[in-house]
């Protein structure tokens, strides 16, 4: 049942892609938020019910990586390209950098640190692209964000896993839940420029991006 829950993310990915193909960006992101919620839920359930031993016929880690690539990378990259936020060669550059770099990152055996954080930016392009859709900064800002975050996938900077990183989890987990709420709210109101959800997205995104780096700067006592 846990593996079946994880696999439902593939269905959400397809529904998101179909919405994106029709230019229904808000609906696309609502499906991606649903997939993000499932992704946050299936890991704790898998560990709680020890699926490695109780359902060993399926490789849950591989299944999770496949779906994460679809929902975190592939569909958001397509949306960024087709949205018109990046014109011409900028759009091509962004999708090549995102998809190619993320494929290498997802296959990197060093992507997790000893405290179950991520080593390097964990390719959460679904979160990045949603914030870009909400704020709609200039195309040079968007391209800069894409290039910088792509480079950060391969540098020894730490990014917290809101569920698995024990340090600051009492704050990180509520921040991740809040981000999910604000993302759903922003998509629900079709990214209305005056929505308070945008401020919530910015604040929670800055925390989730910077918490792991802050932990490296501030050693644990």
Image (cartoon, helix red, strand yellow):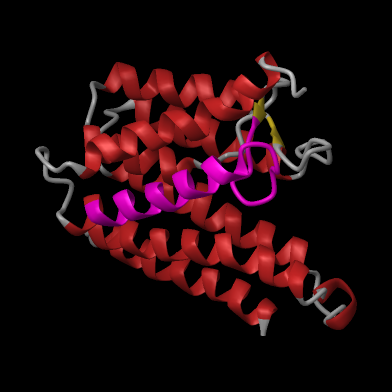
At 83% across and 41% down in the image, what residue appears?
109
At 77% across and 77% down in the image, what residue appears?
49
Where's the C terminus, which quadrant? top right
Where's the N terminus, which quadrant? bottom right
Q: Which residue, as the protein is rendered here, is positioned at the far bottom?
A: 1
Over which residues does the magenta segment extend? 159-185
- Residue 19 sits in which quadrant? bottom left
120 or 87: nearer the eye? 120
> Where residue 160 appears, x then y in whole percent?
63, 37
Residue 176 included in the magenta stretch of the image: yes
Residue 98 visible? yes
> In this picture, is 195 found above or below 211?
below
> In this picture, is 4 found above or below 139?
below
Q: Is residue 56 left or right of residue 208?
A: right
At 52% across and 47% down in the image, what residue appears?
73
At 68% across and 57% down in the image, what residue appears?
65
Residue 112 included in the magenta stretch of the image: no
């Amino acid at each position: 049942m846990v593996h079946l829950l994880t696999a439902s993310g593939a269905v959400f990915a397809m529904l998101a892609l179909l919405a994106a193909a029709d230019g229904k960006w808000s609906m696309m992101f609502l499906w991606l938020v649903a997939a993000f919620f499932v992704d946050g839920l299936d890991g704790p359930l898998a560990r709680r019910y020890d699926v490695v031993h109780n359902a060993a016929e399926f490789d849950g880690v591989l299944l999770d990586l496949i779906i994460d690539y679809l929902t975190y990378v592939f569909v958001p990259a397509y949306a960024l390209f087709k949205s018109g936020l990046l014109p011409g060669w900028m759009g091509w550059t962004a999708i090549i950098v995102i998809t190619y770099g993320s494929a290498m990152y997802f296959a990197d055996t060093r992507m997790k640190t000893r405290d179950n954080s991520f080593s390097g930016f964990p390719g959460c392009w679904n979160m990045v692209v949603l914030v870009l859709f909400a704020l709609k900064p200039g195309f040079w800002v968007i391209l800069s964000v894409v290039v910088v975050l792509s480079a950060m996938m391969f540098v020894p900077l730490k990014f917290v896993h809101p569920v698995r990183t024990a340090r600051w989890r009492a704050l990180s987990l509520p921040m991740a839940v809040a981000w999910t709420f604000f993302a759903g709210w922003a998509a629900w109101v079709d990214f209305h420029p005056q929505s308070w959800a945008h401020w919530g997205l910015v604040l929670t995104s800055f925390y989730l991006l910077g918490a792991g780096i802050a932990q490296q700067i501030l050693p644990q006592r």
